[in-house]
C-alpha cells in the first residue's frame, strides 16, 4: 500500500511539474516574442515617420512639420540649437532614452533620428504607457501559469487514480486470495494490457509455487512416515529388552542410551517437520510446555556426552517459566545449546538457569569472540575451540525455531570468567 501511494505521488508530482513547466515555458516564449515583435514594429514605424518628416521638411520648407504617429512629436530644423543637447550627437536610428516627462517623472522614450539633405528629423515616442501594459500582461500570464499548474495537478490526481486502479484491483484480489487460502486465476479479470501481463505472470508463478508446495508436502509426509516407523521399532524393541530379567547393568545402561538417542531423533524429526509446515502456515500454538521440566530431561539425556570429563552440570530454576509451544521444539533447541556447552567445556561446570522469562546455558569453556557470537547462528558456520568441530547446522536450526515462535536466542562471552553464555529469551 505504501509503495502504491509513493508511485501515485510521483505520477501526480510529475504531471503537475510538467504542466506547470510547459505553461511557464509557453508564457515566457509568448512574452519574449511579443516584446521583440512590438519593439521591431515600433522602431520601423518611428523610422518611417522620421524619414517622412525629413522629406516633408525638404520638399516644403517653412511648412509646419508633423508626424503620422498620433503620439509622436517631430523636431525638424536646419540648426541643432533647438534640439536637446543629448540628441545632437545621436546617429541615424532608433535610440532608447530616459528623460523627465511633463509630469516630472522619468519616462522611457524611443527617439528616432534621421539626417538627410542637411536636415535632421527627431521623432520622440513615449513607451512608458506600453510598459504599463506589459506589466499587466505579465501579471495576467503569471496568473494563467499558476492556473494551468493547478489544473495539471487536478488532472494528474484524476489520471493517477485512473491509471493505478487496475493495479489496486490486482493487489486487492491477491489479498482476498490470502484470506481465502485459495488462489484463483487473475488474468481473466483484467484487460490485455501491461496489468494483464502482470496478472498472467503472477498466475504462472502461483502455479509453480503451488506445485512446489504440494511436492514439499508429499515429501514431508513420506519422510515422516519412513523415519517414524524404524524409530518406533527401535523404541519398542528397546522397551522390551529393558524388561528382560537377565539384563546386566552394563547392557541396561546401553539400552538407556539407545532409548535417549531414539527419543532425541524422534523429537528432532518432529521439530524439523513442524518447522517445515509452520514456515508455510505459521507456528503451532495451544500446547503449554514447562521450560524447567524440558531442561531437566535434556540435561539427563546429555550426561553421557560428558564421557568422564571433570565436568559438573546442574539446573537452577529461580522461577517457573512456561511457553506456548510444543515440547519437541524447546527440547531440540536446548539439546543443541547444552550439547555444545558440554562438548566445548573440557573441565569446570555447565549451569542451566531458568527464570525471568528466559533460560541461559553458562559454561566454563574457552569462550567465544564477541564478533563471532552472531556468526555462529549462520548456516554452515562452525565454531573454533576445544573439542574440534563446532555447531554446524545445529545452531542455525535453533535460530529458525526461535524466530518462528518469537524467541530471542543469542550467545555472548562471559564477563567474569572464561566461557560462554547461550540465552533464549521467550517473547
Image (cartoon, helix red, strand yellow):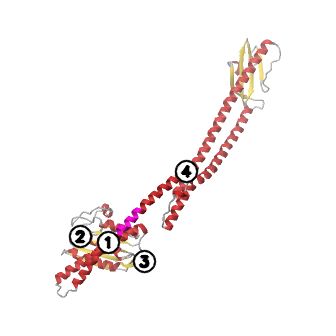
The residue under label 3 is 286
Q: How many marks?
A: 4
The residue under label 1 is 269
Quarter residue 421 falls in: bottom left
Query: If you read the primary sequence from the N terminus, does the residue marked by circle 3 or circle 2 appear first?
Result: 3
Residue 186 image position (x, y, % from top left): 51, 59
The residue under label 2 is 343
Toward the front, the furthest residue is 188
Toward the bottom, the furthest residue is 245
Residue 114 image position (x, y, % from top left): 71, 17
Spatial CA distance of label 1 from label 3 is 20 Å
What span is colored magenta in the figure? 211-220
**Secondary element at image label 3:** loop
The answer to whether one can see residue 305 in this image is yes
Give the residue displayed 64% in from the left and 38% down from the top: 26
The residue under label 4 is 10
Position above or below: 128 against 313: above
Spatial CA distance of label 1 from label 4 is 51 Å
Spatial CA distance of label 3 from label 4 is 47 Å
Q: Nearer the viewer, residue 251 or 288?
A: 251
Q: Residues within 10 Å of mark 4 (few under 14, many from 20)?
A: some
Spatial CA distance of label 1 from label 2 is 22 Å
Task: Please name the predominant secondary structure of the magenta segment in the image.
Answer: helix
Amino acid at each position: 500500500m505504501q509503495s502504491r501511494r509513493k508511485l501515485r505521488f510521483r505520477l501526480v508530482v510529475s504531471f503537475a511539474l510538467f504542466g506547470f513547466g510547459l505553461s511557464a515555458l509557453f508564457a515566457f516564449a509568448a512574452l519574449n516574442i511579443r516584446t521583440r515583435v512590438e519593439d521591431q514594429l515600433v522602431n520601423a514605424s518611428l523610422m518611417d515617420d522620421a524619414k517622412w518628416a525629413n522629406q516633408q521638411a525638404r520638399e516644403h520648407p517653412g511648412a509646419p512639420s508633423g508626424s503620422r504617429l498620433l503620439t509622436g512629436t517631430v523636431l525638424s530644423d536646419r540648426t541643432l540649437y533647438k534640439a536637446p543637447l543629448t540628441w545632437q550627437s545621436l546617429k541615424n536610428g532608433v535610440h532608447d532614452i530616459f528623460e523627465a516627462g511633463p509630469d516630472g517623472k522619468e519616462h522611457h522614450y524611443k527617439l528616432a533620428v534621421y539626417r538627410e539633405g542637411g536636415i535632421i528629423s527627431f521623432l520622440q515616442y513615449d513607451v512608458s504607457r506600453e510598459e504599463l501594459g506589459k506589466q499587466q500582461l505579465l501579471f495576467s500570464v503569471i496568473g494563467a501559469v499558476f492556473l494551468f499548474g493547478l489544473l495539471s495537478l487536478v488532472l494528474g490526481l484524476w489520471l493517477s487514480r485512473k491509471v493505478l486502479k487496475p493495479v489496486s484491483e490486482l493487489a486487492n484480489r491477491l489479498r482476498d486470495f490470502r484470506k481465502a487460502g485459495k488462489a484463483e486465476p487473475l488474468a481473466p479479470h483484467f484487460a490485455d494490457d501491461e496489468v494483464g501481463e502482470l496478472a498472467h505472470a503472477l498466475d504462472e508463478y502461483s502455479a509453480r509455487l503451488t506445485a512446489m508446495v504440494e511436492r514439499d508436502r508429499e515429501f514431508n509426509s513420506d519422510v515422516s512416515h519412513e523415519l517414524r516407523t524404524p524409530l518406533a521399532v527401535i523404541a519398542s524393541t528397546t522397551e522390551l529388552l529393558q524388561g528382560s530379567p537377565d539384563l546386566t547393568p552394563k547392557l541396561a545402561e546401553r539400552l538407556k542410551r539407545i532409548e535417549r538417542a531414539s527419543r532425541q531423533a524422534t523429537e528432532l524429526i518432529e521439530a524439523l517437520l513442524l518447522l517445515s509446515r509452520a514456515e508455510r502456515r505459521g507456528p503451532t500454538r495451544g500446547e503449554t510446555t514447562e521450560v524447567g521440566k524440558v531442561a531437566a530431561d535434556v540435561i539427563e539425556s546429555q550426561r553421557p556426552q560428558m564421557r568422564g570429563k571433570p565436568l559438573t552440570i546442574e539446573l537452577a530454576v529461580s522461577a517457573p517459566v512456561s511457553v506456548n509451544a510444543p515440547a519437541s521444539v524447546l527440547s531440540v533447541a536446548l539439546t543443541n545449546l547444552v550439547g555444545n556447552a558440554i562438548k566445548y567445556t573440557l573441565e569446570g561446570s555447565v549451569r542451566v538457569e531458568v527464570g525471568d522469562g528466559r533460560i541461559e546455558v553458562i559454561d566454563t569453556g574457552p569462550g567465544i569472540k564477541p564478533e563471532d557470537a552472531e556468526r555462529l547462528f549462520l548456516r554452515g558456520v562452525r565454531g573454533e575451540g576445544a573439542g574440534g568441530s563446532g555447531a554446524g547446522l545445529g545452531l542455525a536450526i535453533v535460530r529458525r525455531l526461535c524466530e518462528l515462535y518469537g524467541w530471542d536466542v543469542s550467545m555472548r562471552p562471559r564477563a567474569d570468567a572464561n566461557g560462554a553464555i547461550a540465552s533464549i529469551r521467550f517473547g
